[in-house]
Amino acid sequence: MAANPKTLSKPLPIMHNGDHMKQPEFHFAYSSMPENYRAELIGGVVFEPSPVSYSHARNDNMFHDLITQYAKKSKLAEVAPNATVILSEDDEVQPDVLLRLPEELGGRSRLVGKFLEGAPELVAEIAYSSRAIDLHLKKQRYAKAGVIEYLVFCIEPKKLHWFRLQEEKGIKRNGDGTFCSKVFPGLWINEPALIEANSERADEILAEGLNSEEFNDFKNQLQLRAYSKKRNRRRK
């Protein structure tokens, strides 16, 4: 007996590199793909990344470690590697590392179910085969969504780019090649240490930032905001 067409299950959605779609359609299709599948929706276009190289993974780990150290010291900023972020109806991305403030402390992104919606304050990408996308199209989309600072560490040629996206300009290194974040005071990252994969030197420079007056002021401001929010909740 032939199967009743009405009883047949619908085929699972599939997508390919270069497909055009909106974020809800992309999100639904992505959730049906194999677990190890990875893609991003950037400006309404599906991009499937190349396999992750050893060099990419090694530098990704350094970025993650430095930003995690910062988040732990601040106690209130949040770090996440490779988290899904829904930026707009045309963008769903997975940045290598992001640093954000919780919504209740003035952060621009919010947790909706399992995923972030909105623009994290700081996003970092490691660029190798994705260099052209990260420095151009993705940069434009992050800026449009409201990301404040955007870091791209290019592996070939090795260079750290640090942008203030809402001001359409880059942050300049100081004399020893260190970049100092404006949105997260005390987050100091030394470009030569990244290029040389010198984690000891990178940790040393970050420690200087974490001991700075600007970081202590920022940390105190966050703690005061958190205390004020907590006190207001108790009054209600």
Image (tube, rainbow, N blue to C red):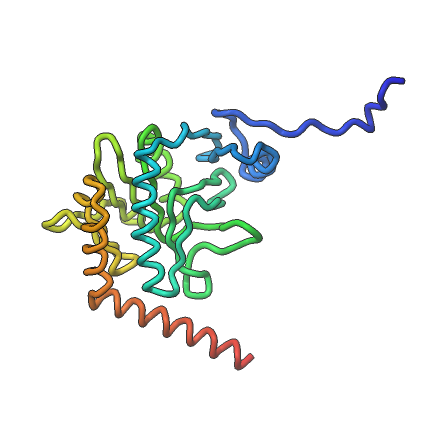
Q: Is residue 172 left or right of residue 230?
A: left
Quadrant where the C terminus lies?
bottom right
Residue that extends furthest to the right in the rendered view of this protein: 1
Quadrant where the N terminus lies?
top right
Residue visible at 35% across and 61% down in the picture? 72
Vertical order, 52 against 174 (above or below): above
Vertical order, 10 against 191 (above or below): above
Vertical order, 128 against 230 (above or below): above
Q: Is residue 63 left or right of residue 112?
A: left
Quarter occupied by residue 221: bottom left
Q: Point out residue 94 in the picture as x, y percentages from the top left corner.
A: 44, 41
Given residues 2 and 148, the one toward you in this image is 2
Residue that extends furthest to the front in the rendered view of this protein: 200
Residue that extends furthest to the top in the rendered view of this protein: 1
Q: Point out residue 27 in the picture as x, y percentages from the top left corner.
A: 56, 39
Q: Is residue 1 left or right of residue 131?
A: right
Q: Point out residue 194 in the picture as x, y percentages from the top left corner.
A: 22, 43
Given residues 163 and 12, the one toward you in this image is 12
The count of marks equals 0
Residue that extends furthest to the bottom in the rendered view of this protein: 235
Residue visible at 37% across and 72% down in the picture? 223
Quarter occupied by residue 42: top left
Q: Point out residue 182 in the picture as x, y percentages from the top left corner.
A: 26, 56
